[in-house]
Image (cartoon, grey):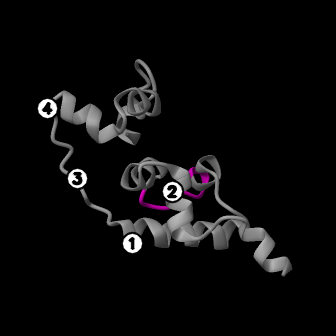
Amino acid sequence: MDEYNDLDDGPCASTIATHCGSWQSALDELDVDSGRRNRYTKQDCIEALREAAEELGEEPTQHSYQRLDILPSAATIQARFDSWKAAKAEADVFAWSARDEA
């Protein structure tokens, strides 16, 4: 997705991914092999979300996560769990900042 966005031509990758259901689905429709399929496991995604929550000191939004430049990408995490919210639930990073206050 980053490589596509770097082209700066046409709709952004997230728009395409939303329209097609995921970036991988868009590639599948075009019969394109990204060569990266399943590069990151769900566990990799969970660990990345927890790392982001630690670094941010709060529950990571997709935007705040992307600014940290942690891999896997927010799009990959969302694709592995079908939604960003589901991924955060699995990683147990909801209301992260409230934990510090307790």
Residue visible at 44% across and 61% down?
A: 71
Marks 2/3: CA–CA distance = 20 Å
Q: Circle 2 sits on which residue?
A: 86
Q: In whole angstroms, how far apart are the C-alphas of marks 3 and 4?
A: 13 Å
Q: Secondary structure at mark 3?
A: loop
Which of the 4 image quadrants contains residue 11?
top left
| Dot 2: element | helix
Which of the two residues, 79 or 52, is positioned nearer the viewer here?
Answer: 79
Residue 55's spot in the image, x, y percent? Answer: 66, 70
At 52% from the left and 51% from the top, the residue drawn is 84
Left or right position of 8 against 89: left
Single out the mark in the foreground, 1 or 2: 2
To which residue does mark 4 refer?
Answer: 31
Q: Is residue 34 above or below residue 5?
A: below
The residues bearing labels 1 and 3 have C-alpha atoms spaced at a distance of: 15 Å
Question: Which residue is label 3 attached to?
Answer: 37
- Residue projecting furthest to the top: 10
Task: Please report whichever mark, 1 or 4, sits nearer to the chain's N-terminal start.
Answer: 4
- Which residue range is magenta in the image? 66-72
Q: Please say if the residues under marks 1 and 4 sit with CB atoms less than 8 Å apart.
A: no
Query: Which residue shows up at 18% across the image and 49% down it?
Result: 35
Mark 3 belongs to which amino acid?
Arg
SS for tag 4?
A: loop
Spatial CA span between label 2 and label 4 = 28 Å
Residue 78 % position (x, y): 45, 50
Quadrant that contains the N terminus: top left
Compare marks 1 and 3 and give the one earlier in the sequence. 3
Measuring from the top left, give residue 29's x and y in whole percent.
Answer: 20, 29
